[in-house]
Image: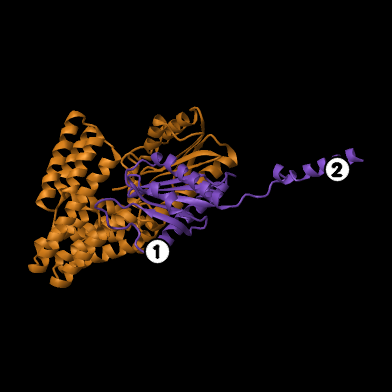
Amino acid sequence: MTWLGRLAGRRRIREAARRLGVDPCAENYLALAREHILVGDSQEVLRVCTEGLHEHPGDAELTRLAERARALLHDQRIKVLRSDLQIAPRPALWRELCELQLEVRNTAKAEEAAEAWWKQTHDPQALVFRARCRTEAFFENRRAEDGRAAYELAILAADENRSDETPLRLAFEIARRCGAWQEARTALARLLELNPGNPDLEQRFRAVQANLSEAISFERALMEVERSGEFKDDCSVQDSGLGDEVTVRSLLRELGSMMGVHGAVYVRGGTALVQGPQGPTADRTARTVRDVVQTSRATARRLALGNTMKIELEGAFGVLTVLPGERGTAAFWGLEGPNETQQEILSSLAGAVGGCRR
Amino acid sequence: MKAVLDPLAHIPGVRLAALISVDGVPIATAEATREGETASMIDQDEELNSYTALAAGWLADVTRSCSQLSWDSPLRAVLQATHGTLVLHNAPGAIVLAVLERGVPYEELRVPIEGAIGRMQRLLRRSVPEPPAPLPSQAEVAPAAPVVREEARKGSQA
């Protein structure tokens, strides 16, 4: 940009800032951010958008611009790191590059960088990062292939550097969440060798030991996760919360008694509670909800949309809103979509407040 | 058709807008391109084909599940996930597909999608020639009138 352009840009920025001072609405924040985009100052764009979002939380365009600015800043740093790596490759730069890619949730690029690092130096740290990338991808998309690769890489990294705990912790986490207790026990045993007498690890070891009777093979556990889209160990955590059937029933009854509600369903595993439809229709309603969740979870994973948070179907039958959550699946069938109160009840039924992501 | 989708793709937060056939074949697509954005969401045609096929497949699966309750095909289906939202809206003979960025409220897209469907239908109506009317129009009947008058004149001369 020429000095004349910069001068004009600075003048426009001053004018936009003055307008914002007079009227701090979202449009004026956007206008100022756009002026900073024109002069290529991503740091300022992010600052203006963050301030704007503080004043106008949830503004879609400000959120989008802030995310773009953040991504742009990351991209700039990644570019610098890449050029530095060509001149003087060293572990600290590789590590930062992988961390940055993981931060922006670009697991594919992070794995690519970790692979290049491994090929160049055969540093065991690179293997740990490859395992981390695959683990992130597995937890996000729940594909068996990712889980298998992540576990194998973690074990390989642990073998390469026997004093490093990180790969063993990754291996344990993968196995634990899938419900492959035999593999979880092996990883924990190795962790205990590195940390003898660690009370937390010992407690976990005892808990895993107790689950060994219902252990399934690692391969089967992975396939089960891919099929259902749920981690086995998440279910055992859920029981401490709203597993109380009485509470679920009362919430369902409250939902079902509201105006304009045709039915409310709660599905968890093979059990379904239905409020509204009776007899065979209740069975069919529960089956429909279960099928819709299953097919939606698989589709969301295939379309790289991540974990399913909500499904809404609208037609001549009314509106069916399905919320798959940590505690189970809650569904609402009404003339219109759920209002705020109904949405809250659905969220507490499904345990979806924190989302099904981790 | 691209002009029909362009206003939809320019809404903040819309990553992709497409018009697809019921079996998932893309008819027209419009992707969001804004300042600073160069990367396309779907790079290859093949990828786009499989993406739209998967989306249409999901709608077909959901419709099949709903048929257990003798429900009609959903007019609108939304799949909200952690990385984005997929919105499918049934139009006559086609489906409007929109993919939104994470956190963008999908309800805000209802009117623009319905607008796009309206535009598409207007465009289709204009391109089809009007069918013939069941009864003859006034212009077709008009030449008969002078004949009657001539016969009347002949009668008066006689």
Tell me the SS state at disc 2. helix
Q: Measuring 37% from the left and 36% from the top, which residue is drawn there?
A: A348
Amino acid of disc 2:
Glu
The purple chain is B
Residue B45 is labelled as 1
**Sequence-first disc among 1 and 2:** 1
Q: Are marks 1 and 2 on the same chain?
A: yes
| Apparent side of residue B100 relative to residue A285 in the rendered image (left or right) | left
From this view, report whether residue B42 is shown above or below residue A55.
below
From this view, report whether residue A255 is shown above or below residue B24.
above
Q: Measuring 11% from the left and 66% from the top, which residue is drawn there?
A: A85
| Image location (x, y in percent) of residue A287 | 52, 47
Decide which of A28, A274 is in the foreground and name it: A28
Mark 2 belongs to chain: B
Decide which of A150, B133 is in the foreground and name it: B133
| Apparent side of residue A226 relative to residue A52 in the rendered image (left or right) | right
What crowding class fits label 1: few (fewer than 14 Cα within 10 Å), some (14-19), or many (20 or more)? few
Q: Find disc 2 in the rendering and name its residue.
A: B151
In the image, which is nearer the foreground, mark 1 or mark 2?
A: 2
